[in-house]
Every structure is written in structure tokens, then in C-alpha cells.
Amino acid sequence: MLCALRKLGLFALTLWAAVTINFFLPRLMPGDPADAALARLAQNGPVTDATRAAIEAQLGLPTGNLWDQYVSYLQQVVTLDFGVSFTYYPQSVSELVADALPYTLILVGLVTVIAFIGGTLLGVLAAWKRGTWLDALPTIGGSFASAFPYFWTALLLLFFLGYVLRWFPSSGAYSVTSDPGLNWQFIGDAAYHAALPAVTILVTSLGGWILGMRNTMISTLGDDYVTFAEANGLRKRTVALRYAARNAILPNLTSFGLALGGVVGGSLLVEQVFGYPGVGYLLFNAVINQDYPLMQAMFLMITVSVLVANFLVDILYGVLDPRTRR
Amino acid sequence: MLRFAGTILSNGKARIGAAILGLFLLIGIFAPLLSPYDPNANDFAGGEGASAAHWLGTTAAGEDVLSQLLHGAQVSLLVGLVAGGLSTVVAVLIGLSWGYLRGFTAEAINFVVNLFLVIPGLPLMIVLAAYLQGGGLIMIIAVVVITGWAWGARVLRSQTQSLRSRDFVTAAVFSGERPSRIVFREILPNMLSLIVGSFFGAATAAILAESGLSYLGLGDTSTISWGTMLFWAQNSNALLTGQWALLFAPGLCIALLATSLTLINFGVDGISNPRLREGKDAR
């Protein structure tokens, strides 16, 4: 119980630190992001006082009390009010983020879990059959594929399967003709559009899980209790899965939480290539249009999502490994 | 040091990796001699496919793809070496002190490192690069170092912690050595393999990060690097015109270079963890 409270406290502290970093980032930069943002926004028409206040709180003004800015920034974060985007004027930043977030969450979340489970099983197999082709193929293939830049895998798949063979759509998250909503026709269409981005993330992230699991598994297989289990005449599969893999998976789970940030980052590039209207695509558009308010809010959203995912993994770790519950 | 290299190279995968890396180093050094044309010359017919005059075709702006590809090796190698090296230096300084110190300072460093570990690197890089537009290669290196040191620091810290309680450290403490000397003269040489390993890891990450940022057009788009080649390729719709060599070649080079460093790390792993060694002495 005490441990759970400590974890919760640490999580809250990390969350606060991330929010604060997001506050100081534009203020530490050379130039004046707030002025640039206000100038860009003025091109779209008159800027209301509320909008001006929102941008000033978020990006900072050369004059003005830092503490007051910080307080109104925290208010913004709590109420999720980040002003209006000037790329997509007059839509508000919060609306845009809320539109984009589900696509990325479903795509990245689902694929990452599949990749982790698949990669871990392949890693167990590779370590168990060490020295055979079942080891060599996933290990070498995995380390080669994980060195692929995400955007390049995406470009290749898009080129061959999207443009040359025309098996898959080349951009978007659903067809213009389909009706967004909870019906089978739309879900099927969305899955069809998500196939290429999903395969890209799967191919590039699978290798890391295979290698990590294989290495910890090899170390675990050398431990005495594994030899003892084998000497007891237990079935090979029982020894591999219930004895060795059960213990080898723990360090991998920690790296699962940490690698999540990398996968999210990679998926940003993947979305950009496929024109997939998720968080990455929106962030990229915000960056090239110097839409700083949108960019700051996106960065905060992405960071907070990864932090929450890590927190959940941390809790799961406590369930799986009783020793950490002390 | 020679024995060190020998152990690494006794691993078959590391040998392959070292061969690929060596090839890229040669290409990078001799790029001006090897490339058939000036990589910036844009007086050829644009958007051509492969031909005898241009083995990999020309870009939409009329530059020779092969010449650009060979010169692109320089940027990736430079970024890998400098950004990987600087991240490793930061990781060593912070990781070792963090592992040796106890009490509140260690807890505070712990918090900062964990924060840097969980904040997703690429979005942070993109945001930093968006503010620092026009910074060129130096900006990219700085951004990569800021976001890339934490992983190495964590690995080195846990090894420092386990070495701290060894007898030779206790002996050094009793003979009255200063903490900085104990950490960097006594402990550091014992974890050289881990440091080398985290250098190759950081260099791989740096190369991939540079290519990603350049591909998004956030670096200096007039620099010739594999990432900017892909940026221009996509901007000029090479996908539609079917110039597969222009899309294929730079990415393959990035992937091969990054793989070579990962493969070398298999050999480095064998030094610190003999169970992962291969060959005759393994079993």
C-alpha cells in the first residue's frame, strides 16, 4: 500500500515536471515565439483578448511576471484550453487534438501490444533454440529491421503496396465515401487504411523486443533453478515458459515502458508518410506552419500519454514481481 | 586494447558489422574521389531513371543521385561520431557520479534521468528543432545529445553501483583518494566495455535521429545527407514518378550503417557478459 502511494506520488511529480518543462521550453528559445504566433494569428483576422491571453500564457511574453504566466498556464492545462490554432483557424487546439488522438492511440496502442507479445515469444524461442536457424533468423532479421528508419520502411511499403501494386490506399484514415461512426463498414474501411502504417510500426519495433527477450532469456537459462527444473524431468515447454521466460520477462517489461516513447516518436514519422490524420501528422503540420500553440499542446499530450502508459506498466510490474511490492 | 578488439571480432556478427562500418568509413573519407560528379551540380536532366551516365538516376532538381549518396555518408558518420560521442561523455559523467553518490543527490539525479527517459525523444527533438530553425548540423547534434544521454547514464549507473562495493574501491577509499579520482580512475576502467557499448548505441540512435529530422525538413535542407535526399525525394513526388532508386538507396544506407553498429555491439556485449559470447570458448 505504501509502495503504491509512493508510486502515485512519483507519478504526480513526474507529470508536474513534464508540464513545467513544456512551460519553459518556448521561453528558453532564442527569438520570441509568442510574438511570432500572435503575428501569424493576426493574418486570419482580429485577435480576441481571450486568444491573446491564451497564447501569452502558453508561450510567454518578453515582459510580464513569470509566476503569473505560470499560474495561468497551469489553469490552461487543467481546463484543457490552449487557444485557437492558426493553421486550422478558427478551430481550437483542444478540438484538433481530440480529433487526432483516437487514431494514434488505437493504431500505436494495438500494434505495440501485438509487437511486444509476438516479439517476446519469438525471443523465447530464439534463446531456447540457440544456435539453430530459429535463433539466427529472428536475431539477425530483427536487428536489421529495427535499424530501418521508420519513415523509410513506411516509404517503401507505400511505394510498392500503395503506388505500384495499388493493394492499399495511399493516404488518409478512411475513404471519402464511408460514414464515420460505429458501423462495420466504417471499421473495416478504417482498418484497411490503417494496415500499412500498422505493418510499418510492427516491422520496425518487433526486432527490439526479440533481441531484448533473447538476451535476458539466455542469462536466465544459465541459472540454477532452470537446470534443476530440467533435472526434475519437467517438460521442455514447461521449463522454457513457466520457469525461464516467466523471470526473463521482468526486465523486458521495464524496457517496454521506456521504448514506448520511441515507438510513439516513430509513429509520428509513419503518420507523416501515410498522411494518416493522427497526432504525428498534426504535430508535423503545426511545426511546418510554425503553429506554436498547437505544437506545445501536442507535445504535452504526447508526453502525458507516454507517462500514463509508463505508470500503468509500473503497476503491472508490481503485480508480476512480488519482490518489488515491499 | 588489442585484446579488446580481438574479443569483439571473435563474434561473427560483430565481424560483419565492422566490415560494413569500415566500408562506409572509406566511402565517407574518399567520397570526393569516388563520386562521378559534383553532388551540388544540378545541370543534368531532372527526374531520370538509372542509366550508364547516372547509375542511380538524377533527382528532380537534376543532381546525380550516386554522388549525393556517397557524400551523404559523411554527414551520417559525422553525426554518429560527434553526437554519439558527446552523449556518451554526458552519460559517463552523470551515470558514474550518480552510481557512486548516495542520499538525496542520487535521488534527485534519479528523478531527472527517469524524466528524460520517459519523455518521448522524437517529439521533443521536433519541438526543439522547430524553435531553432536554421541551426543546421550543429543544432541537430545538440538536440540529439540533449535527448540521447539518459539511457547510457542508467546502464552505467547500475554497473557503478555494483562495482562500488568491491574491495578495490574500499581500499582506494581507505587510502584517502578523492571521490572524483575513485570514480574516474578506479571504477571507470573496469567498465570500458559498457561505455563502448553505450557509445555504439548512442551513435546508432543519433544517426537515426538525424535522418528523421532531416527527412522532416527540420535540419538545413541544403546539406547533402541521406535524410535530406529522402526529404527532397518525397517533396518532388518521387513516389509518383516511380524513381525507386532515389527512395531505396538512401534509406538502405541508413539502415545498413545503423545495423553495422548494432552488430558490433553484439561483440561488445560478449565482453561484459561472457554468456552471450559465441564461438569455441562459449560452450
Image (tube, coloured by chain):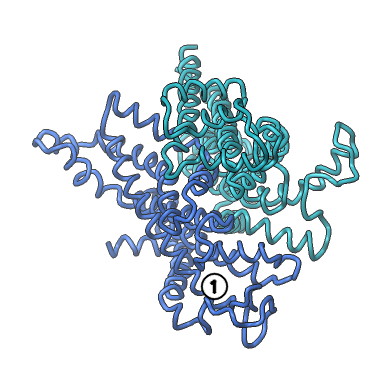
Chain colours: A cyan, B blue
Which residue lies under the disc numbered 1?
A: B69
Q: Could you say where residue B149 lies in the image, as x and y percent from the top left?
A: 40, 45
Q: Could you say where residue B104 lies in the image, as x and y percent from the top left?
A: 30, 24
Tally of marks: 1
Instruction: Tell me if mark 1 has few (under 14), some (14-19) or many (20+) residues whose alpha carbon lies within 10 angstroms of its own.
Output: many
Please, what secondary structure does the residue beneath circle 1 have? helix
Q: Amino acid at mark 1?
A: Leu
Residue placed farthest to the front in the image? A46
As drawn, B182 above or below A69: below
Q: Could you say where residue B194 lies in the image, as x and y percent from the top left?
A: 36, 49
Quarter location, residue B247: bottom right
The residue located at (44%, 55%) in the rendering is: B135
The residue located at (63%, 29%) in the rendering is: A48
Evaluate whether residue A28 shows in this view. yes
The residue located at (52%, 76%) in the rendering is: B40
As drawn, A60 above or below A175: above
Q: Could you say where residue A38 lies in the image, as x and y percent from the top left?
A: 56, 38
The residue located at (86%, 33%) in the rendering is: A181
